[in-house]
């Protein structure tokens, strides 16, 4: 018969327990605090559904230094409580954080199908592929970022207008217009006027050189929900940066300056430029095939970078179910094909039934649902804290971009 002298160890419902092989990670999704330890009876039993995050701890166990040290850390970091067994006749219970998934109906006419359609929130529209600039990384950067790039084809304004007619019935919140050089699309002004009818965020993706060449037409892009994403190749000139700033400011256009970097020298240059002009910029690395070392040294994840990025319960669940980089996003290219990622095969065309297409993407196995379940990440303690797979994983042909050695906890 068990004595009543022990305790109940009860974890709070916002605590996650991740265990792989002999290690365990307790993660507090409210504070971002964590505890890594060698796996033991404590985490194994706490995780059993029938135990409801509450297990018995005997006085003998509390006298063991390994157990008492773990329990003190759990209590001191507000992961849970020790409740004396004497003080309660009933076992205290908590709730194990678990993902409960909606059972989407396949009936395309049901209310559920509209609910599914509202998951489609972001469309990037490549209206053309023509461009007279000659950026060194044009082809490679387009596989990593939704930026302008040269490609074959051009979408007629009639096809675009007909395709976009779904917008009022959808959950779309962001429409990006990209090309080649969108100013070489002869119906750009008409398109800008047409999309101004939709009260969603619009983003125009334009290379900095094209901004300067088309200074007189920048006024077409004005609108309260509009943002201009301006691209600068590595170590672009100070004069160009200054001229583009002046043009956008004088046209009262809201913009984001995106500075591409492929080396640490580019990064330093970009920071100096931002500092000199007191302009906030987004610095985006591109892999060009010869700068793997730059990625390994500066972009690859390590235990610190993963754990410093505090994640909520919702974000952790999202990592377990969807690809948070791609979910809800479609790309319509200038040749009329629709993609979820420019590194994969098309999932449809401009003529496809958009409801069915979205429905397909919600299913397991699609790019929207690609999660960290590859052979390497599946064995990693940080599997669900780590960001979802991205285009970088595709172009570097590596499912994990991390220093695995630093992740093993002995
Ligand atoms: S092994 Fe996978 S899950 Fe773990 S840190 Fe590396 S990339 Fe992330």
Image: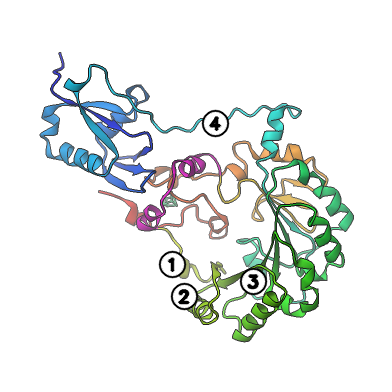
Q: Answer yes or no: do the residues labelled 1 and 4 have beta carbons within 8 Å?
A: no
Return the mark for residue 231: 3
Residue 47 vertical position relative to residue 87 in the rendered view, above or below:
below
Which residue of the protein is positioned furthest toward the bottom in this rendering? 239
Query: From mark 1 to mark 2, how far is it between C-alphas?
Result: 8 Å
**What residue is disc 4 on?**
101
Query: From mark 1 to mark 4, how far is it between C-alphas?
Result: 36 Å
80 on left or right of 217: left
**Front tag of 1 and 4:** 4
Return the mark for residue 298: 1
**Front tag of 4 and 2:** 4
Image point 59% across, 36% down: which residue?
364
Task: Look at the numbered disc 2 and give the secondary structure of its residue.
Answer: helix
First in sequence: mark 1 vs mark 4: 4
| Horizontal and vertical percent position of residue 297 | 41, 67
First in sequence: mark 1 vs mark 2: 2
The magenta segment? 302-322
| Residue 134 seen in the figure | no
| Horizontal and vertical percent position of residue 20 | 35, 40
**What residue is disc 2 on?**
264
Query: From mark 4 to mark 2, how far is it between C-alphas?
Result: 43 Å
Task: Look at the numbered disc 1 and give the secondary structure of its residue.
Answer: helix
First in sequence: mark 4 vs mark 3: 4
Residue nearest the viewer, comparing 290 with 241: 241
Image point 41% across, 33% down: which residue?
97
């Amino acid at each position: 018969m068990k004595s009543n002298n022990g305790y109940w160890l009860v974890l709070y419902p916002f605590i996650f327990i991740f265990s792989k092989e002999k290690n365990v990670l307790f993660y507090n999704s409210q504070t971002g605090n964590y505890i890594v330890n060698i796996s033991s009876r404590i985490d194994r039993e706490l995780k059993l559904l029938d135990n409801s995050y509450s297990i018995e701890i005997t006085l003998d166990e509390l006298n063991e230094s390994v157990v008492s040290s773990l329990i003190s850390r759990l209590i001191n970091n507000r992961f849970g409580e020790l409740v004396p067994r004497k003080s309660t006749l009933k076992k205290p219970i908590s709730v194990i954080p678990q993902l409960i998934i909606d059972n989407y109906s396949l009936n395309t006419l049901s209310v559920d199908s509209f609910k599914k359609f509202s998951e489609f929130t972001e469309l990037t529209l490549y209206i053309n592929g023509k461009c007279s600039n000659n950026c060194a990384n044009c082809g490679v950067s387009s596989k990593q970022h939704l930026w302008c790039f040269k490609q074959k084809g051009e979408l007629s304004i009639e096809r675009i207008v007909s395709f976009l007619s779904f917008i009022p019935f959808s959950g779309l919140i962001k429409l990006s217009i990209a090309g080649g050089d969108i100013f070489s699309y002869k119906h750009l002004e008409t398109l800008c006027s047409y999309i101004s009818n939709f009260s969603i965020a619009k983003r125009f993706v334009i290379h900095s050189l094209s901004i300067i060449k088309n200074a007189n037409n920048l006024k077409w892009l004005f609108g309260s929900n509009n943002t201009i994403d301006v691209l600068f190749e590595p170590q672009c000139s100070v004069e160009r940066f200054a001229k583009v700033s002046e043009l956008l400011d004088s046209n009262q256009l809201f913009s984001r300056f995106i500075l591409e970097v492929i080396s640490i020298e580019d990064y330093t240059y970009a920071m100096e430029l931002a500092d000199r002009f007191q302009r906030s910029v987004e610095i985006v690395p591109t892999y060009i095939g010869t700068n793997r070392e730059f990625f390994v040294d500066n972009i690859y994840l390590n235990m610190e970078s993963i754990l410093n990025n505090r994640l909520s319960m919702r974000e952790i669940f999202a990592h377990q179910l969807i690809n948070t980089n791609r979910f809800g996003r479609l790309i319509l290219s200038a040749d009329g094909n629709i993609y979820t990622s420019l590194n994969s095969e098309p999932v449809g065309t401009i003529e496809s039934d958009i409801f069915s297409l979205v429905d397909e993407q919600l299913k397991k196995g699609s790019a929207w649902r690609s999660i960290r379940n590859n052979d390497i990440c599946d064995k990693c303690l940080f599997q669900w804290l780590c960001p979802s797979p991205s285009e970088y994983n595709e172009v570097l042909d590596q499912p994990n971009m991390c220093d695995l050695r630093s992740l093993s906890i002995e």
